[in-house]
Image: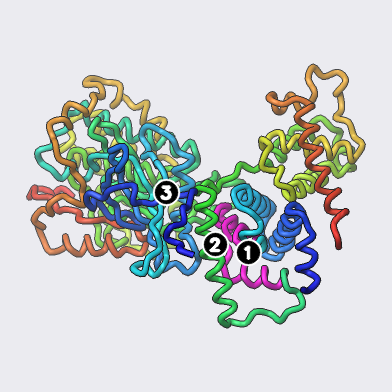
Amino acid sequence: MDMTTFVSCTMTDEQQHRLAVKFIFKCCPKLNLNDTTLSSACVLYHRFYNHCEVEDYDQYTIAATAIYLATKVEEQHTRLRDIVNVCHRTKHPSRPLLELNLEFWNLRDTIAACELFMMRVLKFEVTYVHPHKYLLHYLMSLSNLFRKRDWRHYPISDTAWSILRDSFLSSSCLEHAPQLHAIAAIDLALQCCKVEVPLSKHAKFPWWKALYDACSYKDIVKVQVDMVDVYEIVSAEPS
Amino acid sequence: MATSNLDFPFCHDVGKYERITKIGQGTFGEVFKARDRKTGRLVALKKVIMENEKEGFPITALREIKILQLLKHENVVDLIEICRTKPTQFNRSKGSIYLVFEFCAHDLAGLLSNANVKFTLGEIKKTMLQLLEGLFYIHRNKILHRDMKAANVLITKNGVLKLADFGLARAFSFTKSGQANRYTNRVVTLWYRPPELLLGDRDYGPPIDLWGAGCIMTEMWTRSPIMQGHTEQQQLTLISQLCGSIAPQVWPGVEKYDLFQKMDLPKGQKRKVKERLKAYVRDQYALDLIDKLLTLDPKHRIDSDEALNHDFFWTEPLPCDLMNMLSQHKTSMFEYLAPPRKPNHAQGSSAQAHARHGPHGAVAHQQQQPTDPSYDRIF
C-alpha cells in the first residue's frame, strides 16, 4: 500500500472532497478558465456528490468531468484533449506526459461517458446563478459611498472576490442565495480591511439591507461561518 | 452483476412512452409522437443524436436543454422531462437521450400547405399576436431563436401557438463599448435568413428573429415561403428585388460588411414590399406591419414590443381565437407529413437539397413550390 492510498483511507469524506475541489482550483487557471467557470465546476462537483457516495465514483474523474461540463455550461469552450492533458499532469506531476496512446483515448472516453452520467444524475439541471455578478454590482454601488482615495487604498474588491472564490471549496456554497453569498463576502472583506461603510451611523438601513432586502445579519453571519471554515480545514489538512 | 436489472433513479427510460408515429426531423434528430403509457398524455419525443460526437454531449443539445429549462411561457414549447434508452448492442452500447415535449397537433407550415385550412383576418392576427408575444418573452430573457420558420411554429388543437426547436438558439448579450460579439452567422434556414446574416454579420441580435417573423406573417396569405433562394447570393438578390437595393442610403454602415463588396448586390431596385404583396394582403395595417418587419437595416427593423403595439392588432376585426377553425380539422397537420405538392419547375428540388444540406445545419424539409402560376411573376 503506497502512501497516497494510506492517506485517503484515513481521510474523512469531507477531506477527500476538499482535495478534489482544490484539484479543480489548480486545473482551471492552467486551462485559462475564468472564475465563473471555476465556480460552476465546483458547484457541479458538489451537486453530484449530494446524490452519490465518494466510495462509488473516483473523485478526480468526477472533478475533471465537472470542469469539462462547466466549460460547456458557461460557453467557455475547451477541447476535451486539453482537459485530459491538464488534469493528468496536475494529478501526476512526476509521471511522464501523456502520449497519444491507449491510455489517453481511454481517459478521454471516460470523461465523455462520465459527462453524460453526471448530467443524468443532476437531472440535466446544470445551470447555476452565480453570486459573482451580484458581487460586482454591489461593489459598484458601495464604491460610490467611499472617498475615491480610500476605495483605492483598501483592497476591498480583491479581498471580497477572493473570499467568494474560496467559498466554493466547501459544499455549503450550494445552500446560499446568490445575493446573500455576495453580501457575506463583501462584509467579510470589509472586516478584513477593518473598514466601515461611510455614513453607516446616519443611515436608515444598514448597507446590505439596502442592497438585498430579504436578508438579516444572522443570515450573513451564518454564511460567513461557512466561508471561514474553508480556511481552517485548509490549514489543518496534511500537506 | 446483471446490469440490466439495475434501477437508475435519476432519469426515466423512454419506454414509459409508447411511440405512435414519426412527425418530423429536428435540427439534431428525429421527432416522434408518443403516448405516456400510464397517464395517456400525448407527447413529442426528440432524439439527441450523439453517435458521432467526439467532444462528448453536443453543445447545441445542452444549450437547448438549458434554454428550455429557463423559458416557461404559454407561447414557448414546454419541456416535460428528459429520458434515456438503455445501451444495447444495436446502439454500440451508448444509450440515447430524448427530450420529451408537450404534444402540439399542428405546425404552421403543415396548416398553410393544406388548402382546406382557411384563416380569417382575425385568426391571422391571433396567430401573429402569439408569435410576437413568444418572441418578446424569449428576447427579454436574452435568448435568440435563430431558426424562425413556419415549420418551427407549432399550434395546439386549442389554437395556442408555441415557438419550438431551440436547437440553434443561444443566449446573447448587448455589446459593451467596443467589444463586438462573435456569434456564428451560419444560422437560420436560407429562405428566412435576414440580410445582415447573409452579409456575414457576427454581432447580431433579436432583429434576426423579427425578419423571420415578417416572412412567416407574409406566408399567412401567400401560403408558401416568399423568398426561396437556392444560394446565399440568390437570396440576397430576391431580398433586393422585394425590399429595394441594399445600400448605405437605406442602411447606414452596411458598407462595412466584408461581403458587401464581394456579393453581387442589384443596384437601383426600388422598395416594393407593399406594392407586390397587396395582391395577397388586402389589409392596409397588415401590409404596414410586414413592411416594418422586412426592414433591411436591423437597427431600424421593428422590435417585438413595438410590433405588438401596432394598429394591426388593435383595429377591427380584432384577433380571434383559432380553436373553432381548428376544431373542423380532425387530423394533425405537420409539414413533415404533408403530401408534397407538384413542383412547378425543376429548381424546387435543388432548393430543398440546399436547405437540407446547407452548411448551417438548419433543416428545411419538404418545402413546397406554390401551385399558383402568378407566383413566379410576383416574387
Q: Which residues are magenta?
A: A61-89
Residue at the far front: name it. B1
Q: Quadrant of residue A3?
A: bottom right
Output the chain of dot 1: A
Amino acid carrying mark 3 in the image: His
Q: Residues within 10 Å of mark 2 (few under 14, many from 20)?
A: some
Amino acid carrying mark 1 in the image: Thr
Q: Residue at x 66, y 35 (%)?
A: A177
Counting residues from the start of the chain, the first of labels 2 and 1 encountered is 1
Looking at the image, which is closer to me, B206 or A91? A91
Mark whose residue sits in front, 3 or 1: 3
| B252 with respect to A152 (left or right) | left
Mark whose residue sits in front, 3 or 2: 3
How would you classify the magenta stretch by its main secondary structure? helix
Query: Residue under circle 1?
Result: A61
Looking at the image, which is closer to me, B272 or A113? A113
- The secondary element bearing badge 2 is classed as helix
Query: Residue under circle 2?
Result: A114
| A236 with respect to B72 (left or right) | right
**Are the residues flagged by discs 3 and 2 in contact, CB closer than 8 Å?**
no
Query: Residue under circle 3?
Result: B12
